[in-house]
Structures are given as C-alpha cells and as structure tokens.
Image: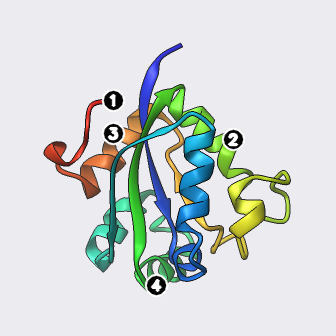
Amino acid sequence: MANERTFSIIKPNAVKKNAIGDIINTFETSGLKIAGAKLAMISKEKCELFYAEHSARPFFGELVTFMTSGPVMLMCLTGENAVLKNREIMGATDPKKAAPGTIRAKHGDSMGENAVHGSDSVASAERELAIFFDRHELVNM
C-alpha cells in the first residue's frame, strides 16, 4: 500500500453550515492526516483554472459562481491510498445517492452543492495541490 497525497475542498455550503470540524474529524478518524490546510476565498481565475476540464459543460458558470461565493477549506490529506480512501469517505457525487455516514450524505445539499471535492487520481491531486498550495505550505507526513 502506498502513502499518497490527495487534495480536498470543503465547499462554501459546508463551511457556511459550520461543518468543517465534523468533516475534518471524519477524515482523521478514517486514517487520513492533514498535511496542509487553509481557509480561503477562491478567485474566479483560480476557480476557472481548477475546473478547466468542465469549461464546455453547461453547469460551468454556475459551478464557478458557487465555488467563489464564500470561503472554502483547502486541504492536503495524506495516508495509505489517500485518493481512494477520501473518495470513499466523501460518498457519491449526488448526496441523495451517497451511502449513509459519508460526508456528502451528511452535509451535501445537491449535486452541485455536495459539501466536498476530492481528487480522482494521484496525478489530479498533484495538479490541484499545485494550484492552491506552495510546496513550503505542505508538511511531509
């Protein structure tokens, strides 16, 4: 099993509901460690870069508007198979289809406002981390 890094965002709707602590507790009790974290407002430019692969989709503008509507918690998570573990903890993209106990089942409001983002691969994690963190901001764990 490989120790990996993955990227996570606690989205504006979950931050607004004061769910940061509960979500971080879920990560930590599942064996993931936080190697970097910061509460931030995402600029429109960074958000468009981050979601560039969705730029031609009809929901792109709404997604950018939502993700820039309030503060988010940006995190680097580490652990054994961190990418897969984080995706399991998050649950299905649609909170109504997410397994009970997952973050999205508990804190998601809709497909678009589903509380959290998590990288889908190690390569995506590295790209996403590079958008929001400088190397010196991340702890080696």
Viewer-nearest of labels 2 and 3? 2
Which of the two discs, 4 and 2, labels the residue nearer the N terminus? 4
| Amino acid type, callout 1 | Met
Whole-percent x and y of residue 122? 43, 32
- Can residue 94 be seen here? The reply is no
Contact? badges 4 and 3 (CB < 8 Å): no
Q: Nearer the viewer, residue 45 or 113?
A: 113
Which residue occupies 59% across, 70% down? 19
Q: Residue at x 28, y 77 (%)?
A: 43
Name the disc covering residue 82, or none: none
Q: Which is nearer the N-term, disc 4 or disc 3?
A: 4
From the image, which quarter does the C terminus lie in? top left
- Mark 1 and mark 2 lie on one chain; the one further toward the N terminus is 2
Badge 3 amino acid = Glu
Tell me whether the residue at label 1 lies in contact with that at label 4, contact meaning CB atoms closer than 8 angstroms.
no
Task: Give the residue pinned by disc 4.
Answer: 65
Circle 1 or circle 2, nearest the eye: 1
Work out whether mark 2 precedes mark 3 in sequence or the reverse, and give the earlier one.
2
Instruction: Report, in whole angstroms, how far the alpha carbon at label 1 lies from the one at label 4.
Output: 34 Å
1 or 4: mark nearer the eye:
1
- Mark 4: which amino acid? Thr
Q: Is residue 107 shown left or right of residue 25?
A: right
Determine which residue is flagged by label 3.
126
In the rendered view, tell whether residue 101 sits above or below residue 12.
Answer: above
- Cα separation between marks 2 and 3: 19 Å
Q: Earlier in the sequence, mark 3 or mark 1?
A: 3
Residue on which the image places disc 2: 88
The residue tagged 1 is 141
Q: Which amino acid type is shown beneath numbered disc 2?
A: Glu
